[in-house]
Amino acid sequence: MLARTLLIVTLGLFGMSSLLAAEFEKLLIIKNHRFEPAEIKVPANQRIKLVVHNQDSTPEEFDSPKLSREKLVPANSKITIFIGPLKPGRYEFLGEYNVKTATGVVIAE
Amino acid sequence: MFATALIVFRETLEAALFIGIIAASTRGLFRRTHWLSIGVIAGCFGAVGVALTIERISTLGEGLGQDFLNIGIISIALLMLTWHCVWVSTHSQETIQTAKKLANTAKNGLSSLWALSIAVALAVLREGAEIVVFISGFTSGSAQSVATMLIGVVIGLLCGVVCGLLIYAGLSKIRTQHFFAVTNVWVLIMAGALAAHLAKALTQSGLVQRWADPLWDTSSILSIDSPLGTLFRALLGYDASPSGLQVLFYMGTIIFISCAAQQVKRLAQKS
């Protein structure tokens, strides 16, 4: 019974995440410890699915106090971060493991 | 080396302070050190396990695997803290009286130390996994750079542990009659902080979309990146711009646990 409930809940979670996939999507690449593009323009007041693809052989941590987001991006992996809806403005983010080079900004307009 | 130490310190700090507060609040309990040590060791193993499989975990659920794992971990830890807070409320008489009597209640199997042991393990797992991922990712350079980095890791870890010991020593200085009142309230606050983390994880994963807007922004007064901000975050669950959901979870948890504890205490007194 417990196993079945867990299965249903898990399937529900995955189902919901795939439903959300239809939203505004942006790809952010990490290469040579830099974000590409370093400036992402997104529409304001809308939820955005940010797909972060780390092409380096080292891990990175996407960190942005302004966006209130923090997530590991393992080497050679793709992860998803939902941000927004954002008010118009600049939202800086950085790669915590390479703060000197890995910096970027989300511009909501 | 300094950058490495800082990253490791930040991750260690939160878990170390959490353990320091938990250890203080359970002072004198029978086999407390034993239970908390099991928690720390299990957490370390868990951290390595998660770090080794982080790539697979991350790609699950269309890149949301980490968030789901995080939500699961925080939920269980929150449940354990809730259980402990309620248990403590029904045993406050004993806790204030003598440590010896506490030893007896613990021997009788009434202790909630097992729950705290799980909460500690999960805290170590959560922060530790990030440290292990970080270390393992950057040890492919020259022997010298690896050695420098490892020194940084050790310094970061030690500084974090020292902070945990400091909070423990500080709390231990409180006079006996106020001691458990202070530590119990602090554990309650830690539960609120965990609930706020849960709210953040739910929003980040996209599972909950309501009340995601920040209610206020105090980052100009106390930035979450500053040393003091980091400390406040670890000790009180401070967030410079918390979402409505975070505030709701934080306050809701503290109110819920307080009410549940009162209710259970009343029932215990009747019977």
Image: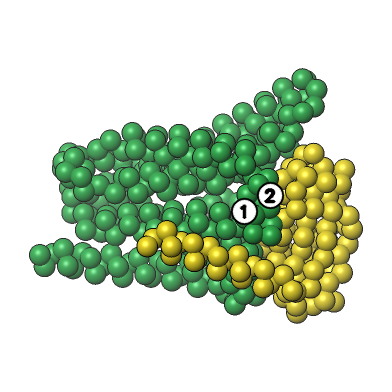
Chain colours: A yellow, B green
Nearest the viewer among A23 and B36 is A23
Give the letter of the chain under mark 2: A
**Could you say where residue B203 lies in the image, as x and y percent from the top left?**
61, 68
Specify whether A108 is left or right of A64: right
Residues at discs 2 and 1 both on one chain = no
Q: Nearer the viewer, residue B102 or B168?
A: B102
Q: Cα distance, mark 2 to mark 1? A: 8 Å
The quarter of the image holding the C terminus of chain B is bottom left
Which residue does the image show at 72% across and 49% down from the upper left? A73
Left or right: residue B163 compared with residue B98: right
- Mark 2, Cα crowd under 10 Å, few <14 / some 14-19 / many 20+, is many
Return the residue at label 1.
B66
Q: Amino acid at mark 2?
A: Leu
Q: Farthest residue toward the bottom?
A: A45
| Quarter of the image where the N terminus of chain B is located | top right
Count residues near mark 1 (Cα–Cα under 10 Å), then give few for <14, some for 14-19, many for 20+.
many
Number of labels in the image equals 2
Q: Which residue is mark 2?
A: A72
Can residue B33 be spotted in the picture? yes
Give left or right: position of B128 versus A31. left
Residue B176: x, y in percent?
Answer: 27, 46
Chain name for mark 1: B
**Residue at position x 20%, y 45% in the image:** B109
Query: Under tag 1, what secondary structure?
Result: helix
Residue shown at 57%/74% (left/top)? B244
Q: Look at label 1 and name its amino acid.
A: Gln
Q: Disc 2 vs disc 1: Cβ atoms closer than 8 Å?
A: yes
Q: Residue at x 43, y 55 (%)?
A: B76
Tell me residue A99's x, y (percent). Answer: 79, 46
**Can you say whether B249 is above or below B26 in the image?**
below
Question: As rendered, which of B2 and B173 lies closer to the eye?
Answer: B2
